[in-house]
Amino acid sequence: DERGRPYKVTRNGRLYFHPAGPALTDVWNVPFLSTVSRERVNYPSQKPLALLERIVLASSNPGDLVADFFCGSGTTLVAAQRLGRKWMGCDVSERAVKLARRRMAEARSAYQMTLWASKTGPSVQHSP
């Protein structure tokens, strides 16, 4: 398919198509974030948006709540927003919270976000 997932095989010279579309594999070909990637926000453990979109698509339906309790730079939240899911994110790092808030504002999230300090550190929460 367009994402590089196999849905057809050739056996004994004959071509067979999987009736349900691309077969799931345990290898995902998702490019890493290069140092000059437009997506990069200079957060140490940032994951590619394509990876998180694939995970969100595979594990939820539109309108479901996606929770990321170690949201870091907010990539999971951006993926959930783009795919029509509700989301909630938390992190103890003030830097991560500010970065996630900025990314959600850039993703044009219409949802209210609250920033507060707790005993364990700042958090960001989505209020549906």
Image (tube, grey):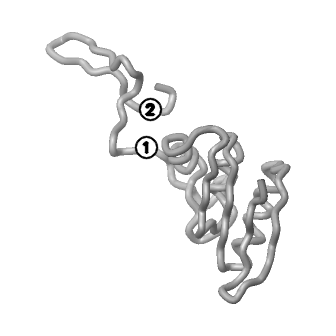
> Which quadrant of the structure image shows residue 46?
bottom right
Relative to 23, residue 61 above or below? below
Q: How many marks?
A: 2
* Residue at 64% across, 48% down: 79
Query: Please, what is the three-letter code of the amino acid marked with disc 2?
Result: Gly
Query: Which residue of the protein is positioned furthest toward the top in this rendering?
Result: 14
- Seen at 49% across and 41% down, the residue is 58
Q: In which quarter of the image is residue 73?
A: bottom right
Q: Residue at (78%, 71%) from the top-left corner?
A: 98
Most foreground residue, 13 or 118: 118
Give the image location of residue 70, x and y in percent: 59, 69
Q: Is residue 95 above or below residue 8?
A: below
Q: Position of residue 14 (x, y in %)?
A: 21, 10
Q: In this view, does 120 lie to the left or right of 13?
A: right
Q: Is residue 38 above or below residue 84?
A: below
What secondary structure is marked by label 2?
Answer: loop
Q: Residue 94's mark?
A: none
Relative to the observer, which residue lies in front, 41 or 52? 52
Q: Which residue is drawn at 51% across and 54% down?
A: 32
| Residues tagged 2 and 1 counted as in contact (Cβ below 8 A) | yes
Disc 1 is placed on an element classified as: loop
In the image, taking residue 123 as reference, residue 6 lies left or right, namely left
Name the residue tied to disc 2: 4
Question: Of the residues shown, which amino acid type is indicated by label 1?
Answer: Asn
Reading the image, the residue beneath label 1 is: 29
Q: Position of residue 11 (x, y in %)?
A: 18, 18
The mark that comes first in sequence, 2 or 1, is 2
**Circle 1 Cα neighbour tier, 10 Å, few/some/many (<14 / 14–19 / ≥20):** few
